[in-house]
Each structure stands twice: as C-alpha cells, then as structure tokens.
Image (cartoon, rainbow, N blue to C red):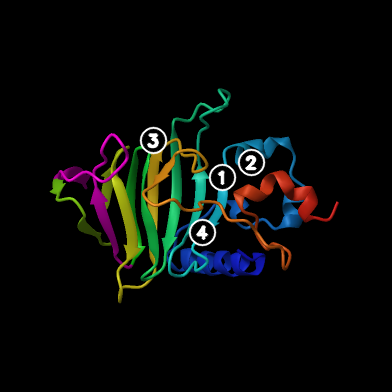
Amino acid sequence: MKRSELNQIIDKGIEFVEQMHFKLPMFAYWSLEDWKTKGPEFDEIKDNMLGWDVTDFGSGDFHSVGLLLFTLRNGNFNDPKYVKPYCERILIQEEGQILPSHTHYRKMEDIINRGGGNVMIELYGMNEDGTYSDQPTTVTMDGQKVTVEPGGVVRLSPGQSITLVPGQYHKFWGEEGTGMTLLGEVSTVGDDRVDNRFYTATGRLPDVIEDEPPTHLLFGDYPNIDKLSGK
C-alpha cells in the first residue's frame, strides 16, 4: 500500500472516531517528529504493537477488502515483563468493506458495535484440519447463547456484541446502507503477526511504498523511525 493512501485512511479514521465521540490516547495523534523525541519510557507502546494498523489483506483494494485498527492496550506473548493478559482495540469498518474469514489460535475476543452502521458476521466452526465444519457453532451475544448453522450470518447493530473463541471462523462486512461502523474489541493478548489463521491465504501486514512522509505511524513503523526520518 502507498504511504499516501495510508495517511488518508488514518486521517479519515480519526475524523470518524471524533464524530463518534470516542477519545483516543495521545499517541494516536503523534507525528513522526513527535515520535523522534520519545524515549524508553514509551517502550510499551512499541513492544506491544499499540497504535495504528491498516491492512488490505493483500487485496490491493482497501475499500473493498480491508480494515483500519487502533490498539489501545495489549500484553505480550513473548516478554514476561508485560503482564497484561488482555488487549483492547477499535476497528473502523466501512460500509460494504470485508474482513476476510479467519480464526485465531489463541485469542478469545468480544466484538462490540460501538456505533455507526451495522456489521454482518458469517460464522463457521473449524475441523481439526482447519477446514470449515459442517456442524452448527454456538456463540454468545450479549450474554445469550446463539446457535448458528454453518455459514450463518448474524447482525451486530450499535450496542450489540458477540464473543468469539479460538476455532470459530468469522468474516465481517459493513452492511450496505448503514454507513461506517466503530467496533470495539476486548480480548486476550493479541498478536496478528502469528495468531491469525485465514481460511484463504492472505497478506495481513502490508508492504509500504514510501511515496510521501507518514502523517501518523503504523505499529510496524516503530523499528524504522530513524530510517523514515532520513537518518
């Protein structure tokens, strides 16, 4: 993805979050110049992949297949000095935009519609070989057990939530005619570099074409701050 496209996506996301009256932490707004002034007291942000995350899942068409995320807090699978067993994110999904079918090896998550449009979720259980199960799968929606047939679809309207456990494939898309949606995610520790299993192989973290300077950094930019700043 081009840096210019990433900049536009994040700027639009910030505008939408503000419209939804959701408050982001200070590091959501830091520029590259701001980041260059931050010392080791902010290592938790960098080590635990907090901040902005944009992906088109290798589609080449973010607005059709893609997602904008911001991780507010997270633990760490690999570093015992970070003891948080939980993660919190927001996900910004455009109308009609698809998040491809996937599950997680370790992460259990609640997805909450915080406002805006509706999100549709297609569900499958998983066989031992990773294929879709032909058996119903049971989820919890706001404390209610709901059994869904293979490939069944549930709707999350503003205020509604769903709990997903490892081994439950889920595919999201913004319901046509309802607008952009602000989703919350509350989960066990998240690491999308190693904990995603997509039903169809896809790219999770984009290669960035640097056609202009970044206005906000992605979490994948943290190791390259000096390079981005031209040092």
Which residue bears the numbered disc 3?
Answer: 105
Residue 199 numbered tag:
none
Left or right of residue 211, residue 204 in this image: left
Q: Looking at the figure, which quarter contains the N terminus?
A: bottom right
The residue shown at (49%, 38%) is 194
Q: Give the residue type at disc 3.
A: Tyr
Magenta-tinted stretch: 117-145
Q: Position of residue 107 (x, y in %)?
A: 39, 37
Q: Is residue 60 visible?
A: yes
| Label located before the other in sequence (3 or 2) | 2
Amino acid at circle 4: Gly
Q: Dot 2 corresponds to which residue?
A: 46
Residue 119 sits inside the magenta stretch: yes
Q: Which residue is mark 4?
A: 58
Say if 71 sits above or below 42 in the image.
Answer: below
Q: Amino acid at mark 1?
A: Leu
Label 3 vs label 2, nearer the camera? 3
Residue 216 position within the rendered picture, expressed as x and y whole percent measured from the top left = 65, 59
The residue lying toward the viewer, choosing from 91 and 29, is 91
